[in-house]
Every structure is written in structure tokens, then in C-alpha cells.
Amino acid sequence: MNRQSALKSILCFVFFLPLFFYLTEPKTTQASPSTELKNQLSLAQLSYFARLGTGNTAGNSFIYVNNTGTTLSINNYNLDIGDSLSIQNSVSGTNVYVVKGMIDGNGIALNTAIGISNVAPGLSVIVPRYSIHTISFKPWSSYQDGKWQVLIKANGTAGTNTNDNSPDPSGFDQGNLLATAVTCPWGAATATGIGTTIVVSGSPYHVITCPLPAGGTNPLGGTGSTGTIVIGNATNMLLNPAPAPNHVIGQANASADTYNFILRHLDASSNVIDEDTTSGKIAVTESVRITATVDPTITFSVGTSGVTTPSTSLCGTAIGNGASNTTAASLDFGSLNLSAFNNLAQFVQCTTNASNGYAIQTFESGQLTMLGGSTTIPDTRCDGSCNATTATAWTTNTSSGFGYSLQVGTTSAGATLGITTSGQYKSFGVGYANAQTILSRTNVPAGTDSAYICYRITVANAQPAGTYQNEVNFIATATF
């Protein structure tokens, strides 16, 4: 080979050398955080965890819980009629009673007489609330044989157990969750890590890991793919927290009753991809108790319009005199006027920094039911055609019924109200599966969105006398 030919060969080799390494060492996928992350809870209701107060006597069919302190439940709020109430036995174990009603602010009526081993002050009184967590997200990175991992805030209070199926005051308990109760995305195998906790930034978290099948990768969100991890099923779930220290009735905020969850992407060697770690928040609070009484001595009068102190007008009508009894956790209609509209209201508000907004949903535990019996005030049909999903006018008040309307409070552009026409009403859906959205948006609110939910009850002359109760639940879900 002459000198000129050798020089050409060297130049050719130098030119193609970078191309050779590019072809044999392709660029790896770059990691990016997942988007549209949210955690939809099947029940965003606090567990009930109280302590017996003083003065409880064996043989009585009611108990009183301790109503002082800054931790746990210190009243009878957040209890539903029909709840199975576990009361600690002073010898060992627990005994189960059924809640039949509420007495004042911290008394609980039971289905049977309390036993001698269930009356000592300080014994625990518990109703656990379990929830399925449905995590959805759009992934923007993909690794062969990678893993998707969800971390849910566990209890961090000293001296407590994160895996004893008892409500904790600063996080979710393991409850009765099993690996077989977790559904993983993209053909992933059975979840791993169930029953273990790890510490992240000083706080403990429950671990749920979904490994992709051998040789598999997940699609990217740009293809329209959404990953869904369902944590729990109808029988095996995480256990919701008890009220946190500094709990405020009806409120969950940065100081109490909001809990972190984290979505992490791991590579085939279980290394955390820091660039693909996304966080969200879970908020839990009490249910709202609805109480209404059909008084045996009630009378219906005509001609009183304009002679009482004017009331606040909401949802196209004036709320009743019982408004002064409304709290964040209860509404007491008191004695109802027969064949008339009885109206009360509550104020709800929401703000979030989630890029895809939020949805506030509501449902009832069941129809308003007479304490100690089975008679109900039915869910309204309005003037014959409304239901849980369709709102119509409600101008006829001669039939018994219970429902609600909505009025916007303060919102910015993009918020959507579940009922948009003043004077129209819906009935509540019964159970989580029939929850309906009352306020939502798909973008970041400019401030705090708010609305009024206006409750209405009518009772016919033939409605049996008694006190009726049910529970209305709210679910607030942010989409990050």
C-alpha cells in the first residue's frame, strides 16, 4: 500500500469510528417525572379511635367517650348508625357492639347492654375505615425490566405499630392488605414489598412495588397510555388514619390529616430513578351527619311569610332557623315543618397546586332512617324526574324526600359546578360507587374555589314521627 492509500484508510477509519460507537452503544431512555398523578380513595373518611370517658356503667345500652385532649376522636362525630364498634376488654381482646344512635356530643347508643369488662376509663373505642387506593399516572420514561413503586405515608408516632390493623394518628396502617389484592399495570407480576415500610426524608412509608414482566417496558404517556395501580380490593385494604394531633373537625390541611404519597420509577437493578419521582397528597376527614326530626306535636302554619327575621338566600331559597346549629361535621334540621321545604346549607372550598385540578364528590351512606327502626325519608324525585345524576326543579313539597342543590361561592375560570341551574336539585347517590361530582376543574385554580351545598327535606303529613339520621361523605381528589 502506498503512502497516499494508507492516509486515506486512516482518515476513513477516524471518520467512521464515532458512528461505530453510536450504533453499538445506543442512547438510553432519558428519565422524566410522570404527570397527571392522582390517588382516588374509595373512602376518604377518617377511622374512629376514641377512649372511654368516666361514668360508664355496665348494663347500660350507651357509653360516653373522653371529650378532652388534642389527639384521637374526642366526640361521637364520624360515626354511622350500624357501625360495628370494637370496645377494648379490660381482661383481653375486644367486644363488638353496633351503633344505634348518638347522644349529645360524645355519647353513643348501642344495640345491647355494655359488659362489665368494657366500661373502664381509657379503654379504646374503634371503628376502622378501610379504603382502596387507585393510583393513576402518565409515564414519560421507560426502562426494560423496570419497576413502578408507590409509597403511602405510614404512622410515624413513637410507640405505635404500622402493621397491627389498628388506626394510627399520623398515617395509614397496613390494615389487612395482601399482595394478591394489588393490581399492577402493563402485565406486571404480583406486587412485592407488601407489609414492609421504608423511611424517606425522615418519614415512614408503606411500600407497594409492581415489577414489569421479564424483558418488558411500559409505554409512554405521549401515546395516550395511563398506568393504573389499584391497591386493595373489596376485602383487603389499607386502613385509614385516625384523627391526627391538632385535628380540626371537618378540615384537612397542611398541619393535620393530609398525607404524602410518592410514585417512584426503579430500573432493573431496583435503583430509584430520581428524575422520575413524583409526589402527591391525600386528604381525609369526617363524614357529615344529617339529623332531622318529625315532631309528634308539630303543626303546619300558613301566612307567616315576611314576619320572621330574613334568612340567608342560597340556591334560590332561604335556609331555615336551624342554620345556627350547623357545624362542619353535622346538620340538625330540628323539628321539620310538614308539607313544606326545610333547608340548610354548608360551605365547601378547595384549592390545590395540582396541574390537572381536582374533583369534589359526595355520596350518602343510605336514606335518612328512623333511629331504632327501619322507616325512611326517601331520596327525592323532585317533581318526578330528578335522581343522583340528573337535576330538575323541585317545587312540590307534599311528598317526603331528601336531596341537595348547589350554588357557586368564589371560583376562577375553569371551575365546574355539578348543578348549574338555580332551583334545581338532585338526590344523593348511595355508596361510594354512586358518588357524584359537585365541584371540579382540570387546571390549577387561581385561588380557593368554593361552593354552597344546600340540603332540602320535605315530609308528608303521613310521615311517621321519630328522629332520622344518615351520613353524607365528601371525597376531594387532586390530579397532579
Image (cartoon, grey):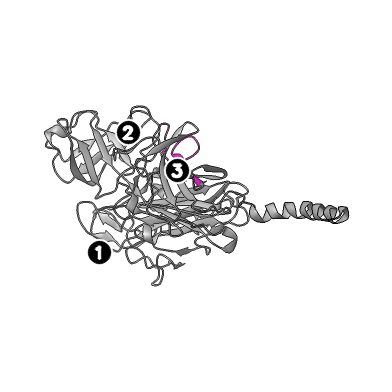
Q: Secondary structure at mark 1?
A: loop
Q: Residue at x 46, y 40 (%)?
A: 258
Residue type highlighted by circle 2: Asn
Q: Residues within 10 Å of mark 1 (few under 14, many from 20)?
A: few
- How many other residues sit within 10 Å of disc 3, few (<14), some (14-19) or many (≥20)? many
Find residue 446 and report its horizontal and vertical position in percent.
Answer: 63, 48
Which amino acid, by three-letter code, is at mark 1? Ala
Closer to the observer: label 2 or label 1? 2
Q: Residue at x 35, y 56 (%)?
A: 364
The numbered mark at residue 353 is none
Q: Which residue is mark 1?
A: 462
The magenta stretch spans which residues?
245-265
Task: Give the CA distance from mark 3 to mark 1.
Answer: 54 Å
Mark 3 vs mark 1: which is more N-terminal? Answer: 3
Q: Position of residue 268 (x, y in %)?
A: 49, 48
Q: Which mark is residue 161?
A: 2
Q: Nearer the viewer, residue 224 or 2?
A: 2
- Looking at the rendered structure, the secondary structure element under dot 3 is strand
Quadrant of the image containing the N terminus: bottom right
Where residue 371 sits in the image (x, y, percent)? 23, 51
Residue that sits furthest to the front in the current view: 1
How dense is the environment of label 2, judged by Cα within 10 Å: few (below 14), some, or many (20 and up)?
some
Sequence order check, earlier mark of 2 and 3? 3
Q: Earlier in the sequence, mark 2 or mark 1?
A: 2
Where residue 151 is drawn, which disc sits there? 3
Between tags 3 and 1, which lies in front? 3
Q: Quadrant of residue 203?
A: top left
Horizontally, residue 313 falls left or right of residue 247, namely right
Outermost right residue: 4
Instruction: Measure the alpha-carbon separation of dots 2 and 3.
Output: 17 Å
* Residue 302 visible in the snapshot: no
Is disc 2 placed on a helix, strand or loop?
loop
